Amino acid sequence: MDLEEAKEFKERCTQCAAVSWGLTDEGKYYCTSCHNVTERSKEVVNTEAIPNTKIQAINRGLKRKQKLEKGWDWYVCEGFQHILCQQADALQTLGVGPELKNEVLHNFWKRYLQKSKQAYCKNPVYTTGRKTAVLEDNPSHSDCDSAPELLSDFSCPSFVESGAESQPDGHARKPFSIVKAPQSEMASICSGSLDGVEYSLRKEKGIVKMSMPRTLAFCYLSLLWQRETVTLSDLLRFVEEEYIPYIHAFQQFPEEMKLYGRDKGIFAIESWPNYEDIYKKVIEVATFLDLPRFPDITEDCYLHPNILCMKYLMEVNLPDEMRDLTCQVVKVTGIGEVGFLTFDPVAKKTETVKYDVQAVAVIIVVLKLLFLLDDNLEWSLSSIAEKYNEDNKEDKPWFDFRKWYQVMKKAIDEKKQKWEEARAKYIWKSEKPLYHSAIDKPVVHKRREMVVNLQKQFSALVDSTPAVEKKSPSSFQFNWTEEDSDRTCFHGHSLQGVLKKKGQSLMTKNSLYWLSTQKFCKSYCKHVTTYEESNFSLSYRFVLNLFSFLLRIKTSFLHEEVSLIEKRLFKKKYNNKTKKKSSKSRK
């Protein structure tokens, strides 16, 4: 072959380091110095220049297709790394700072790989075949430049590991990447990943296995460390509204990362994340990583109960004057103290704060202090407020609990109906078909194609209305303004109808209060309190259901938090009860 056509290839020969190339009859480059033939081939445009070019080009195309079908060698942790990157990018799109991904989440993930013995340790669990590329942090790695970078923005700051091979502090930042390794014989026929079967069966004591729900735990821990304006309930709602990848996150894997068999059970998920479950996993992951005390939650921080209470008062259309009362409850109970609010996994406190749940629990306690919520007093006070507002239309209106109940019930019912319809219509099957083995692939693809065609035909017949554009994400689910003539906004309404002056201070006209929980379960019980809906008033149940839907949590979970706030607020009552019981038992 003429050497002129090989001049564009400038790489050095791996055998003799010379840069002198020619082309074989098959179109591959060979070194004219040592006659070493590479796997690289020239893309031929003029087929008349090389004999048998047509046949060779077809052969090369088949080889490339076979290589693509087989895919890369990859490990399960690399798949989770790719998903974490997607979720961090989504959070950044929502307004979170880039430090969350490039520094905080990166270090948490790196620490997890070390603690789970998958990387940054002397004896990683992957002892055969290639090591995972996420574990490699060597700038001299020969494959890094040509590797398809999954976490191209995931910069690699220096990180001091404990009791293992630590990276030098002066190490240059380099993005994590998955190495396009040669296809090995160890690739399992039961999974696309090299360790899918092994990972599914792995049950090592003390090791927290990575899972899809735990990716959200990592995200929330990173948000908490950065003290971002995103609560756990907000995070899970953004997941449900598909602003953050979760259910079908594996669809964004590179095409060469084949996913089937056991991988399906690891990455494919068909249930929405649950607040209580993710909350437990947050504590579990933080404890496993042995994370230090998080940055302090101070009064100017979004997660402080005073600020969150103000946010939720606006959300549920309650008067602004209630903010002073919520602040008083926060102060008396001590739940606004830095030591109480700051997350410290090492200290292993018995009470770990659920910031959003705690804030709405404070509001419910204040509503009980003002209106008792016994299906009697709140309606009597509402009648008084209604009469006052009719007689004094020019004055500042008094807050009418009955009217607020009617407005909020209508709004929440409409919102809940839309939410239930969206859940019912949600398509759990992914666009990217999943199959148990390579043998099932053609059948699965054919079935998926038929389903898509049927869906298109059915949607064309049933629903001809254009799809509604997706709204931009917001931390508020309800917006209340004075200009809205269709719905009453209660933010500017007065609490004079339920408060009375006593000297320089204001007191509630209602002097009664009933405790949500009369008796707490013993320490060995799994829950703190029990919640039987039929035992409580309708108005209390409405308020519980309202806030529970807002946070997407169970009413029993919120009732428990209300009981804990009351326990701190009415310490003397509970102490007196225990003293009386102990004295009776002695008699």
Image (spheres, rainbow, N blue to C red):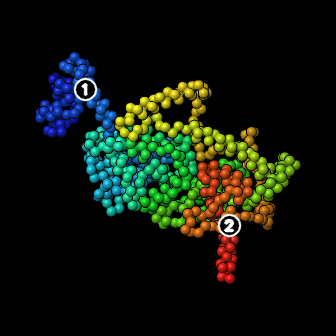
Placement of 388 over or under 16, stated as above or below:
below
Looking at this rendering, what residue extends furthest in the top direction? Answer: 48
- Front residue of 504 and 554: 554
Quarter of image, res 507: bottom right
Q: Is residue 333 above or below residue 57?
A: below
First in sequence, mark 2 or 1: give its number.
1
Q: Residues within 10 Å of mark 1 (few under 14, many from 20)?
A: few
Left or right placement of residue 417 versus residue 52 in this view:
right
Give the percent coordinates (x, y) of residue 531.
Answer: 65, 59
Residue 190: image quadrant is: top left
The residue lying at 36 percent from left, 43 percent from top is 191
Q: Which residue is mark 2?
A: 518
Label 1: which residue?
59
Q: CA distance from mark 2 to mark 1?
A: 79 Å
For residue 262, what is the image quadrant? top left
Q: Residue at x 63, y 52 (%)?
A: 548
Would you say 185 lies left or right of 150 here? left
The x, y position of residue 298, in whole percent, is: 56, 60
Residue 496 location in percent, x, y? Answer: 79, 56
Which amino acid type is marked by label 2?
A: Gln
- Between 304 and 194, the one nearer to me in the picture: 194
Identify the residue shown where x is 32% and y is 40%: 72
Residue at the image position 40 percent from the left and 61 percent from the top: 206
